[in-house]
Amino acid sequence: MQPTDSTALFDPDGPLAQAIEGFRPRAAQVEMAAAVTRAMTDRIPLVVEAGTGTGKTYAYLAPALAAGKKVVVSTGSRNLQEQLYHRDLPTLVKALGYARPVALLKGRANYLCIERLGRLNDAVPGLSAEALNDLHTVRRFAPLTTSGDVGDIPGLPERSEILPLITSTNDNCAGRDCVHYQDCYLVRARNKAMEAQVVVVNHHLFFADMAVRDTGFGQLIPDAEVCILDEAHQLPEIAGQYFGQSQSSRQFVELSRDLRLAQKTEAKDMAQLGKAADQLERCAQDFRLAFGLDTGRGQLRPALGRPAVAQALARLNDSLAFTHEVLKLALGRGEQLDQCFERLIGLRTQLDGLTRVEENGYSFWYDCSRLHVALHKTPLSVAERFAAELAREQTSWIFTSATLAVGDSFAHFCADLGLTECRTLQLDSPFDYPRQSRLCVPRYLPETSGTGRGTLLANSLLETIERVPGGTFFLCTSYQVMREVAEVLRARLDRTVLMQGEDNKVRLLERFGQDGRAVLVATGSFWEGIDVRGRALQCVVIDKLPFAAPDDPLLSARLEDCRRRGEDGFARVQLPKAIITLKQGVGRLIRDVDDRGVLVITDARLVNRAYGADFIASLPAMPRTRSLPALNEFLSHLE
């Protein structure tokens, strides 16, 4: 199909209008489709910021299908990935009469592992009552599934303790040696993807595939003639995770548990294996405890200088060496023991690399959850590595998102990804924000870092939330504020109050939409990729400008790198990232031409700091007020 032909797909009497009820062509959508077609033809990378309501999904999917090329579409979240595959793609396939195979592929951790589930029993040490209940839920689901997708398990919390035990990792997967290889859900999904003409993945899998290809040991997703990266503003951060290295104490604990299971089935006479496994698990747990009881991130270099951490690391290394010697004696006794030995060698090598913290060009940091500590080595820039990927001659690249530019400049995004030669396009939203919306930054707000801030905010906004005819998103920048807000609203508000983490994200959104007047209190993962239209969402509250925490180790390493190069780290790194994140949160409010609603940002820095003007300039043209009574008046006319 020639570049000019793509616009015909969107004609008032074209194939989309004929097949999709209520379809109306939009000028910005047609312009983007033409640019996508051109990029597929001349292979000059295209960067498109398409404002909310542009219809960017159809604008890139329709030309890609019509061109008949091998396409990989990567999205920013599993939620958007499923929406694209289950809703948008089938609609276009039908409208265009597309007859070639399409596939959905997720990362390994999303698929039930038949082998690991089969070996689990209720006597697994350390499992809580909630985890055992979740295990029974999984067992009821297992015979009914055809995809093995754990996200489809009804009632299973998205952070369930059982998930690592019923899914596999690169470390513990036996691959072709597994007796369930032919029935493996992950293998089936990958085989289907390799044979498909259009494959929908997410950014984590996209970069995991790049990392696997770098090793020379295969690939996870097929080669493509066209790579379309939606929600592209996430790419630099996610790429850094995969172009670096990470290791969690959980991996040592899982190795210990798998080693005990292997000893019971393949080397019952080697009691020393069990002792080595017990010691390794204990040392991994002690290593976590050496970082303190608090959760959160920190710089690894100073942490390793603390005596408690250094001693715990030494004991962990000694335990790994002891386990290595014992396992050597068991080689050849069985497949599980041999596999444990290979994992152990890999984990020792990785731990050594992650604790050599003097290497330049990387941030060495740690991240503590309640039970585990993860060590990370992340490159300060992915531009050089990604630029090498862009040089692939036979591939066309399209990057798009509702939030890529800061003001009208794409310089920040392009520099982060090494895009030295590309074509850019900025398309405004078609929505009438002055008529459809209001923005309020209330007066008399508590300090942005004050204790009990969530409680104060929730109490001050009760009357406003009560006046919203439909539903409300209360988007927070920390889990602590999220919990405080939810506690107040549940105690004082006569509405359903939902909180992130209490159920799978998709089901939370279903409940929110069906209720029509609910309040959903959430953090980062609900700031983007969420599409709730109409009365169900008429108010979005954002608790604070989303600057990354100043003690974030990756941020502080990048700021230090800017300082050494004589650059302003705040202007180069912190401000652009915060602006793009805020634009994402704001984009949840108005999703259709008939939507109306209010945005409340409870951070006075938006109006009393000089950089507040940079945020305002990047937001839609919403009429602004500082008066909650004035906002309540607007709300009273929403019905």
Image: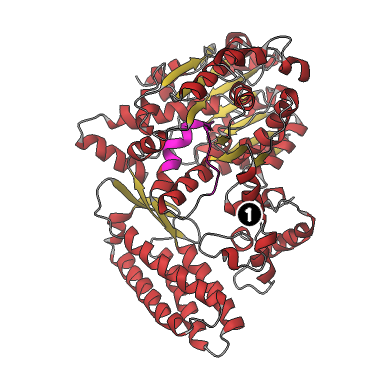
From what the image shows, is residue 42 above or below residue 175? above
Can you see residue 442? no
* Direction from residue 594 to residue 7 in the image, left or right: left
Residue reaching furthest to the bottom:
269
Q: 303 or 294, which is in the foreground? A: 303
Residue 74 lies in the magenta stretch: no
The residue shown at (71%, 22%) is 534
From what the image shows, is residue 499 above or below residue 416? below
From what the image shows, is residue 623 above or below residue 406? above
The residue shown at (61%, 39%) is 199
Q: Quadrant of the C terminus?
A: top right
Q: 262 or 630, which is in the foreground? A: 262
Provide the residue designation for mark 1: 186
Quarter of the image where one finds residue 605? top left
Q: 636 or 222, which is in the foreground? A: 222
* Direction from residue 562 to residue 134 in the image, left or right: right
The residue shown at (53%, 35%) is 456
Can you see residue 350? yes
From what the image shows, is residue 477 above or below residue 271? above
| Residue 596 in the image, given as x and y percentages of width and height | 66, 16
The residue shown at (54%, 32%) is 457
Q: Which residues are magenta?
A: 220-239
| Residue 455 in the image, given as x and y percentages of width and height | 55, 38
| Residue 575 in the image, given as x and y percentages of width and height | 37, 28
Quarter of the image where one finds residue 83? top right
Q: Which amino acid type is marked by label 1?
A: Leu
Q: 423 or 237, which is in the foreground? A: 423
Residue 229 lies in the magenta stretch: yes
- Label 1 residue SS: helix
| Residue 532 in the image, given as x and y percentages of width and height | 67, 28
